[in-house]
Amino acid sequence: MTELQQQCELLRSLHRPGNPLLLPNAWDAATARAVVAAGYPVVATTSWGVAAALGYEDDEGAPGDEMLAAAGRIVRAVDVPVSVDAEAGYRMEPAELVAALHAVGAAGCNLEDSDHSTGGIHDTAVHAEWLAAIRASAAAIDYPLVINARIDVFVPPFLAGAGMEAYRELVPAATDRAKAYLDVGVDCVYPIGPWESDALGQFVSDVQGPVNVTHWPERQSSAELAELGVARVSWAIFLYEDAMARFADDLGTIQG
């Protein structure tokens, strides 16, 4: 195996339901090194933080080549597997995206089902077909890329400030998407949004595959998420937000 293939397989092996992979998300080489220095076995990026550090908005507001170049710098800065938040693929064809991820040395990637050109979400079958093409393109170059398929059906109610009832109503749709994506060969599914424990436990049970969730402040602890059977926990944008808030506080202290 090449070093990258070994990193892919290590990353895949760390997706253990009930003993989740904890991923405090980094946004540049310095924060990636801090993650490794703290003892974490994998670095995952946050597209929000990476885009902000480059001077752009999230949701593919940054050019794909700049985001991938930043990912490459992160990969070069550490000696552990790196999972790259590749958003919705930057409108690249599957083979082109896979080649770009391979070139920067990504062991894994997040791929979301949002359609940033319309502000909506891709049809389940259409997106599953695209994910299948990603898997096939990776297999064609013997690249065991770990694919984490993000499910965005909960994003609109979250942005609208809806209550938890709106999320519960969307659980069946999220479950259907998760099963469709796992059926075409993704390694993990990531229904992004706040969860109630009962709904999350039911989702994990129904999906019967590795599930990634976001660690939301003041919600379930990592131990509680493990008990619910999740395989991967991401901190998403929260560490970036905390760091920027601390920076702003320090700047205020300097001014007196």
Image (tube, rainbow, N blue to C red):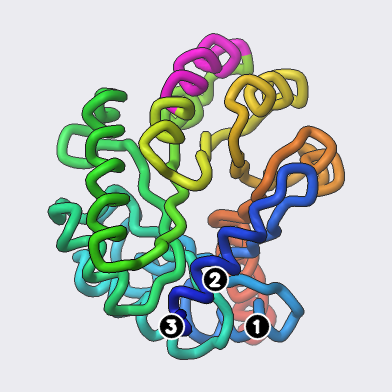
Please determine whether, in this image, residue 245 is positioned above or below residue 183.
Answer: below
Mark linked to residue 26:
2
- Which-is-in-front pick, marks 2 and 3? 3
Whether residue 256 is visible, yes or no, is no
Which type of secondary structure does the marked residue at label 2 adopt? loop
Report the front residue among 45 and 245: 45
Please determine whether, in this image, residue 245 is positioned above or below residue 121.
Answer: below
Q: Residue at x 44, y 41 (%)?
A: 150
* Mark 2–mark 1 CB contact (< 8 Å): yes
| 220 to the left or right of 185 | right
Neighbourhood count class around disc 2 (C-alpha, 10 Å): few under 14, some 14–19, many 20 upward: many
Task: Give the residue type that dot 3 points to.
Answer: Thr
Whether residue 84 is visible, yes or no, is yes
The secondary structure that dominates the magenta segment is helix
How far is mark 2 from mark 1, CA to CA?
9 Å
Q: Residue at x 45, y 74 (%)?
A: 5
- Which-is-in-front pick, marks 1 and 3? 3
N-term mark: 2 or 3 = 3
Task: Return the residue at label 1.
Answer: 34
Placement of the C terminus among the 4 image quadrants: bottom right
Which type of secondary structure does the marked residue at label 1 adopt? helix
Report the front residue among 32 and 204: 204
Q: Which residues are magenta?
A: 165-177
Task: Give the residue type that dot 1 points to.
Answer: Ala
Task: Return the residue at label 3.
Answer: 2
Task: Give the residue type that dot 2 points to.
Answer: Ala
Q: Position of residue 247 (x, y in %)?
A: 60, 76
